Amino acid sequence: MEERAAAMIAAGSALQLRAHAAAYDFGHVLDAAEGCAESAMHVRSIANEVALVMQVTSGAAQGQLALASMTQQDFAALAVALDENVVTPAQVHKLVEVGFKVNHDDPVEQAERRALFVEVMLERVRREPLPPQALRKAAERVAEELTGESIDQRHARARLQRRATVEDLGDGMSIIRVTTDTFVAHAIRDRVRKQALAIIKARQRVGAAPHAETQIAADADADAAAADAAGAASAAGSAFGVAVDDARASAEAGEEPDERSLNEVMSDVVADMLLTSDPMGNSAAAGIQANVQLSIPITTVLADSDSASDQPGRAPAMLDGMTPMPIEDAKRLAATAPAFLRVLTHPITGAVQAVDSYKPTAAMRAFLQARDIHCRFIGCRQPAVRCELDHTEDYQHGGKTAVWNLSDFCKNHHIVKHHTAWKVRQLDGGVLEWTTPSGRIYISRPEPHGVIFTPTDQLFRPTEEPRRGEPVHSERRERARPVSEALPPRPNSSATPPF
């Protein structure tokens, strides 16, 4: 059964690879014919529709289409081997990734070397079943022997891909990834580890954490000695001195001892340095502060911390309107926030009705950000604070600047909407109806802001009173209406927006 399943997966992946390559090549031909190959409007449009079928982001779909086209062109033997179940999809991914490192100034010579690379690696796979990561290591050695490009040239090109990204993990935690030079990455980790060890050693000296492991203290001594020998312990020494003062002050104040593990301290040290220090290389970025957008239900803010912890169903604080975060962290940030906007929601459905603000233009933007939360293209989750407002009916064609004719789009999908065959129509309640270039229809609804239940005695209809002697049961509830019914009707062009 496993063998049959593997063969089916391999054949399906081969079929998908050919479909992706055909889709990319078709879009590229259209772009070239219309003179827009550089902006790749048709490729982006096709990728957006493929993304809806695959249920991935449009950027991921466009990358897969481009990769499939290059794989078919430069590593055709891998596609055949995948169809024959000689290699797995994961192995093909690793071999293509490494195979692109085989370069040469002469295109013909480069094609021959890449073909030889595939031939050698397929023979290796037939001899020995290698997991993808082990196969990657073996492929890198072969690629290094076949490439005509030096490591310096490849490194210079790879440095153009430096970036910092954030991935939300849930439970109020995230991973921040920084792509940088290898030696810089190892140096950063080494410095952070030394500072974390110095902090742990300092808390041991003042008795703040007597339970700390002896091995950590030994590591701290060894690292400090090595740093002194190298003449590079100034940063660790500074952190050590600060840690001693902090630990002593905590002990005198009767605070709980610092029980963080080495990894926890390292994570906190990185966050402290990034949030509180200025860049050394350029003063233009000095003094810039971090900004985040929080949405906190007023009932949650006013609730007592102890009672909030006893009610797990209480509406949570949201980061960028999408990611739940601990309420105590949200309250601490709110205490130092320069300003907050009050968002009024429907008492039953929680749908956004209005936003307080003085300037109408700012209020409209705040209303739409609160309603949309993210880019309104199907499946896109770019936060609305980083999106652009778009007129559903173009302003130059008579479209009104009103909340029922505006929605938030990220820059990529804003361009796709205006320059390709994608069509969008705004229905009542902020619901968008998308029509793809091939004619499929998708509906994008605003994110719900949660259902809010009020006391039972406030839900009786005006003409309805409990009969004499009839007990009032907590189970008696008025049926919650859909968001589209709860929202006010779309105003005409002369009406004032609801805020």
Image (cartoon, rainbow, N blue to C red):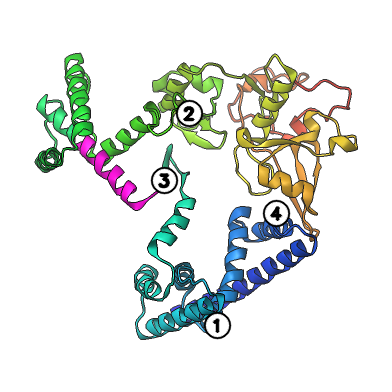
Identify residue for label 2. Answer: 284
Residue type at mark 4? Ser
In the picture, the disc for residue 39 is 4
In the picture, the disc for residue 259 is none
Residue type at mark 2? Ala
Identify residue for label 3. Answer: 178
Lower sequence index among marks 3 and 2 = 3
Q: On screen, 178 above or below 6?
A: above
Q: Does the magenta portion include 194?
A: yes
Q: On screen, 97 above or below 108?
A: above
Inter-mark Cα distance, 2 to 1: 53 Å
Inter-mark Cα distance, 4 to 1: 32 Å
| Discs 4/3, front | 4
Q: Secondary structure at mark 2?
A: helix
Lower sequence index among marks 4 and 1 = 4
Identify the residue at horizontal 67%, vertical 66% (top origin): 24
Identify residue for label 1. Answer: 80
